[in-house]
């Protein structure tokens, strides 16, 4: 539809032009190269997003046409929905645990790799590997096997005489297992940290050495402050990702968020409302609340960033 | 000129091929029919279905059938999404639980006009037809009947030196199950914990003269019923007749993860047609029998269409789709390929023909249905809107009780209050 409307335009255009090759042609070429993304963005992201805003004010069961009900969905979410608050709690617990731990782990490993060990590219690639696989269904399935009652993890623990619980099917541990899965995908923040560490000039450390600062002082006084832009970036990206986490919980609990809703992430609850119980209007309202929360968090981070992020320029 | 592959010719070529592909989506010949067929189930079911499809295509070269299959849990979200996009498959495997909901919302086509023409199911008994009707109109073609069935590992009971759990009371059942666990040193349990299984709960409720839902779609049980149910299973957990909650939580409500298949427990609470699927995944010979019985005379069991074929309301190939559906339930060759994996055929003639060539397992299923038929009660009304959510909720509360986070009495209270909230919202 959109495609066929645009293609004739690009063909007929050159004939109208007074000059055979010029700025307009370049613009058109660049737009035509951009077109696949642009069409995808307008048709598959922006359009549905706006549609969901409308749907969030309706009662929509997928089979019948949506009925406009004003802000009733939002009112119910805030005043009369235990599961909303529960899933919020689960998601916040996940974000608060997973993001700092993942960043700390990624930074620690980046610092080890930054010490110039032999075969660095190989290690970098190896450590990055989980991130390539991480969010995939296959890994979540693998994780489910590893952390089952008689999974590999408990076999290893048994060597030390520890009788491990059933990590994924015991509500006391299931969320931590998901946090661990998230930390394991430390590859992309690690690569970014590594690049950030490379940017810090070595003469600063030399000067610190001469002044008698030990390694801990150097880390706190030099590395961390100079790395704050990278920490800021990684922090925001990882937090947004953590809020949106869906696949691992969905696969490991087979879509239930169980046991006992212990892994009922907000996204999973939203999915259940929309696709399992066919309340698409309500699910749209939930989605917009998540969007607002993430937007608020990001805005807050940017506003406070000037007090703690040091740009070295 | 062909060498001169500049940008403009490239664009023209692209435009041309775009036009061609648009043409390609039109059927090349008017009489050709392309049917989208959609079903849920195990791999065994997929294999059988695809065999029937290829035989049908061989006999009807102008018909092309594209099959899509998913697991139960993913099946319904996808169907609802496609229906919302007005792009649902033509021939839909439908469940008794959902047929009224889809039919009343105008997503399914009434099939009465095909009766006696391309749909030749006049020899179906009244119950088999009525269970596929909504508000007096036929919306489904019964593929086969089933009933609740306890599927068990025979060897496990033999090893324990106790009788198989055939037509026993609940008390006796748990006694046998505990003996099985004991004989396996507590490593393997006599039964899976079925407190989260709605089919088992419903059967047990019917034995006490209650139901999940009343005729008018209200809750058909009270707090004490639910609390007694949870208490019965809590006791089974105590006597180790069934596994602890963290083991049971591995069961994700399908054949593959059921503790019977996983080699953790000897009994699974399920439907008779699923016996075939279970046996494929289990090395040990499996038995099939009725659920444990209550003390009173009320039958817990009933016969129901294990699934039916429905036609999407907007389908453009309704007639060819009905013909294929008819092939699977009324053509001896087609019905034989499906066997009894989808239930026991409703047509007496087909049932006889299929039974004659069944393997031992298939015969067991047919015999089981014959054994149950005189003992069944009436089919309950189609569940109200929100029933799916209540089913999920039963699982959660049963887990809460299992993990000791709720007492059995509070579990009963919570079931009733949450179920009422869900029903009043839907």
Image (cartoon, rainbow, N blue to C red):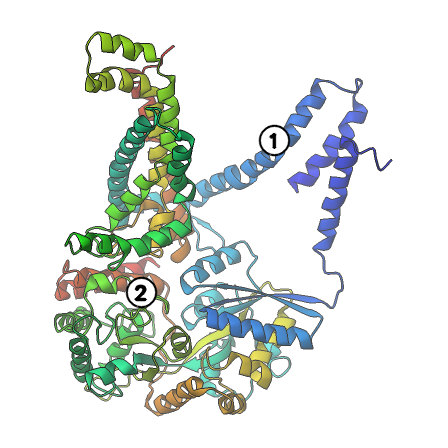
Is B169 displayed left or right of B91 in the figure?
left
A113, B339: nearer the viewer: A113
Determine the secondary structure under disc 2.
helix
Residue B26 seen in this snapshot: yes
Q: Nearer the viewer, mark 2 or mark 1?
A: 1
In whole angstroms, how far apart are the C-alphas of marks 2 and 1? 48 Å
Q: Whole-percent x and y of residue B394?
A: 26, 64
Determine the secondary structure under disc 1.
helix
Q: Report crowding for label 1: few under 14, some 14 to 19, many 20 or more residues within 10 A (C-alpha).
A: few
Q: Whole-percent x and y of residue A198?
A: 38, 20
Residue B396, compared with residue B158, is above or below; it is above
Q: Residue furthest front?
A: A118
Residue B322, compared with residue A267, is above or below; it is below
Figure quadrant of the N terminus of chain B: top right
Residue pointed to by mark 2: B391
B213, B261: nearer the viewer: B261
Residue A18, compared with residue B324, is above or below; it is above
Q: Whole-percent x and y of residue B124?
A: 51, 87
Please, which chain is the residue tagged with disc 1 on? A
Please, which chain is the residue tagged with disc 2 on? B
User: Residue A256: which quarter of the image?
Assistant: bottom left
Is B109 displayed left or right of B369 in the figure?
right
Residue pointed to by mark 1: A34
Q: Residue at x 51, y 37 (%)?
A: A46
Q: Whole-percent x and y of residue B249?
A: 26, 62
Figure quadrant of the C terminus of chain B: bottom left
User: Residue A200: which quarter of the image?
Assistant: top left
């Amino acid at each position: 539809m959109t495609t066929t409307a645009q293609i004739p335009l690009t063909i007929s255009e050159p004939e109208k032009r007074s000059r055979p090759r010029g700025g307009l042609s370049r613009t058109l070429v660049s737009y035509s190269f951009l077109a696949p993304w642009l069409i995808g963005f307008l048709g598959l992201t922006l359009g549905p997003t706006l549609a969901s805003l409308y749907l969030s004010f309706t009662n929509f069961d997928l089979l019948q046409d949506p009925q406009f009900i004003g802000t009733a969905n939002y009112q119910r979410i805030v005043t009369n929905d235990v599961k909303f608050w529960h899933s919020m709690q689960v998601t916040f617990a996940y974000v608060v645990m997973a993001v700092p731990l993942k960043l700390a782990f990624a930074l620690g490993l980046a610092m080890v790799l930054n010490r110039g060990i032999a075969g660095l590219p190989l290690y970098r690639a190896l450590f990055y590997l989980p991130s390539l696989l991480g969010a995939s269904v296959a890994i979540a399935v693998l994780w489910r096997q590893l952390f089952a009652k008689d999974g590999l993890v408990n076999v290893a623990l048994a060597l030390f005489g520890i009788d491990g619980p059933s990590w994924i099917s015991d509500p006391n541990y299931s969320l931590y297992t998901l946090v661990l899965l998230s930390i394991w995908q430390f590859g992309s923040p690690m690569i970014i940290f590594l690049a950030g560490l490379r940017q810090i000039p070595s003469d600063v450390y030399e000067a610190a050495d001469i002044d008698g600062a030990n390694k801990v002082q150097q880390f706190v006084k030099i590395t961390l402050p100079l790395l704050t832009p990278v920490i800021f970036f990684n922090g925001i990206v990882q937090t947004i990702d953590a809020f949106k986490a869906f696949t691992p919980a969905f696969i490991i609990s087979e879509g239930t968020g169980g046991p006992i809703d212990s892994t009922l992430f907000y996204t999973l609850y939203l999915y259940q409302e929309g696709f399992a119980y066919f309340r698409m209007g309500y699910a749209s309202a939930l989605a917009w609340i998540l969007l607002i929360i993430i937007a608020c968090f990001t805005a807050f981070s940017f506003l406070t960033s000037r007090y703690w992020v040091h740009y070295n320029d | 000129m062909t060498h001169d592959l500049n940008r403009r010719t490239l664009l023209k070529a692209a435009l041309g091929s775009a036009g061609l592909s648009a043409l390609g989506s039109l059927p090349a010949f008017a009489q050709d029919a392309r049917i989208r067929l959609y079903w849920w189930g195990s791999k065994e079911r997929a294999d059988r279905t695809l065999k029937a499809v290829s035989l049908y295509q061989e006999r009807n070269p102008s018909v092309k059938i594209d099959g899509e299959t998913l697991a139960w849990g993913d099946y319904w979200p996808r169907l609802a999404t496609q229906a919302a996009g007005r792009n649902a498959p033509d021939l839909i495997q439908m469940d008794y639980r959902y047929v009224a909901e889809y039919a009343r919302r105008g997503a399914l086509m009434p099939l009465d006009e095909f009766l006696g023409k391309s749909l030749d199911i006049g020899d179906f008994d009244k119950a088999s037809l009525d269970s596929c009707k909504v508000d007096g109109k036929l919306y489904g073609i019964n593929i086969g009947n089933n009933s609740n069935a306890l599927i068990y590992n025979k060897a496990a009971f033999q090893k324990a030196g106790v009788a198989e759990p055939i037509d026993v009371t609940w008390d006796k059942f748990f006694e046998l199950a505990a003996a099985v666990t004991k004989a396996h040193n507590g490593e393997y349990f006599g039964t899976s914990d079925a407190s989260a299984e709605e089919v088992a709960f419903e059967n047990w409720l019917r034995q006490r003269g209650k139901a999940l839902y009343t005729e008018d779609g209200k809750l058909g049980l009270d707090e004490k019923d639910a609390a007694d149910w949870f208490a019965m299973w809590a006791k089974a957990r105590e006597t180790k007749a069934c596994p602890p909650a963290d083991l049971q939580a591995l069961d994700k409500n399908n054949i593959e993860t059921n503790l019977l298949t996983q080699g953790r427990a000897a009994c699974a609470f399920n439907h008779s047609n699923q016996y075939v699927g279970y046996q494929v995944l289990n090395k040990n010979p499996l038995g099939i029998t009725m659920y444990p019985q209550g003390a009173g005379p009320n039958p817990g069991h009933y016969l129901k269409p294990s699934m039916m074929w429905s036609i999407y309301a907007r389908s453009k190939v309704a007639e060819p789709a009905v013909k294929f559906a008819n092939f699977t339930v009324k053509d001896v060759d087609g019905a034989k390929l499906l066997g009894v994996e989808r239930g026991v055929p409703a047509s007496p003639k087909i049932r006889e023909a299929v039974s004659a060539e069944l393997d031992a397992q298939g015969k067991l299923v047919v015999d089981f249905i014959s054994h149950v038929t005189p003992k069944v009660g009436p089919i309950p009304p189609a569940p109200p809107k929100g029933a799916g959510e209540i089913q999920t909720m039963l699982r959660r509360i049963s887990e809460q009780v299992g993990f000791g986070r709720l007492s059995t009495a509070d579990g009963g209270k919570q079931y009733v209050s949450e179920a009422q909230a869900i029903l009043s919202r839907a």
